[in-house]
Image (cartoon, rainbow, N blue to C red):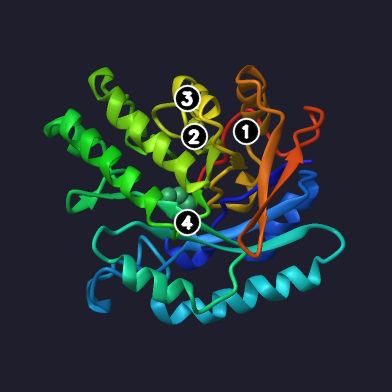
Amino acid sequence: MPVDFHTHTARCGHAGGETRAYVEAALRAGLSEIAITDHLFLYDRPADRRDPRFAMREEELPGYVDEVRSLRDEFAGRIEVRLGIEADYFEGHEGTLGEILGRYDWDVVLGSVHWVDGDWVDFSAERMESGDPAALWGEYWRLLEKACATGLFDVMTHFDLPKKFGHHPPAELADARERAVLAAAAADLAVEVSSAGLRKPVGEIYPGPELLRLLVHYGVPLTLSSDAHAPAEVGWGYDRLRRALALAGVERVAGFSKRRRHLRLLGDPGEEANSPLEPPLL
Ligand code: ZN
Ligand code: FE
Ligand code: FE
Ligand code: ZN
């Protein structure tokens, strides 16, 4: 009875659809739990420098929380709707994030490293193509390791995100990658297995097969996610995720309530209907 622990709302400026439609899509897909985890406002910079294409505005946070709570009540008994948030890790701003997270009773807090060396690592292929991919990857692994150790997050998202445009992690940085995995294990947090990478130029699940084996080897709990930015993407690609997990010998995935982790058996494949052959266009 799987879960989708990473979905967005129209507030973030690059997702579409009614939030209720995400929950309805999860119901149709036969999921047991859906976490709504929209992008937290960009708390590391002054309000007038927060690009509205990347995250909700600060003043939208209370309305967001209210909407997810009311959906949770409305759908009670049919599907568990979890109150989540996807928070960027901004090095040096850990205290601010801790203060913001303390304002609400989250079910789950996702930690994401999108901001690497002063810019987004996943916005375009340009940085990898015109810069030094090994340096960017090295800085990414360092930040990811540090983010894991903050204790601020329950789940780390898209663990090998910089591969998005097809630039795979350099083999010579295997140690840095392993340190990030060890930090996740030490922090007792979960890592998502996400179909989002299948919809991107890299065409591969986050994390890739080798990294997934490493996470399993160190006993890191895993959760499932689509990173849906449209209702049609909820539970999308789960047949592929199930196959990857079966190959890695994983039988249980994590869900969260009030920031406490529980495990669910993966169950039979073919339960979810919401996996069209082609990714929906957005
Ligand atoms: Zn997004
Ligand atoms: Fe993200
Ligand atoms: Fe996301
Ligand atoms: Zn994301």
* Labelled disc at residue 202: none
What's under tag 3, amino acid-wise? Leu
Between tags 2 and 3, which lies in front? 3
Q: Nearer the viewer, residue 2 or 144?
A: 144
Residue corresponding to mark 3: 214
Point out residue 14 in the picture as x, y percentages from the top left corner.
43, 57
Q: Is mark 1 within 8 Å of ligand 4?
A: no
What is the residue that sits farthest to the front in this orientation? 186
In-image side of 148 versus 3 (left or right): left
* Cα distance in 3D space between marks 2 and 3: 23 Å
* Labelled disc at residue 199: 2
Residue corresponding to mark 4: 153
* Cα distance in 3D space between marks 2 and 1: 9 Å
Q: Residues within 10 Å of mark 3 (few under 14, many from 20)?
A: some
Q: What residue is at 38 percent from the left and 51 percent from the top? A: 149
What's under tag 4, amino acid-wise? Phe
What's under tag 2, amino acid-wise? Arg
Q: Is mark 4 within 8 Å of ligand 2?
A: no
Find numbered disc 1 in the image and state the secondary structure of the residue it sits on: loop
Q: Residues within 10 Å of mark 4 (few under 14, many from 20)?
A: many
**Would you say the residues marked 4 and 3 are in contact, meaning their CB atoms lie under 8 Å apart?**
no
Q: Residues within 10 Å of mark 1 (few under 14, many from 20)?
A: many
Residue corresponding to mark 1: 237
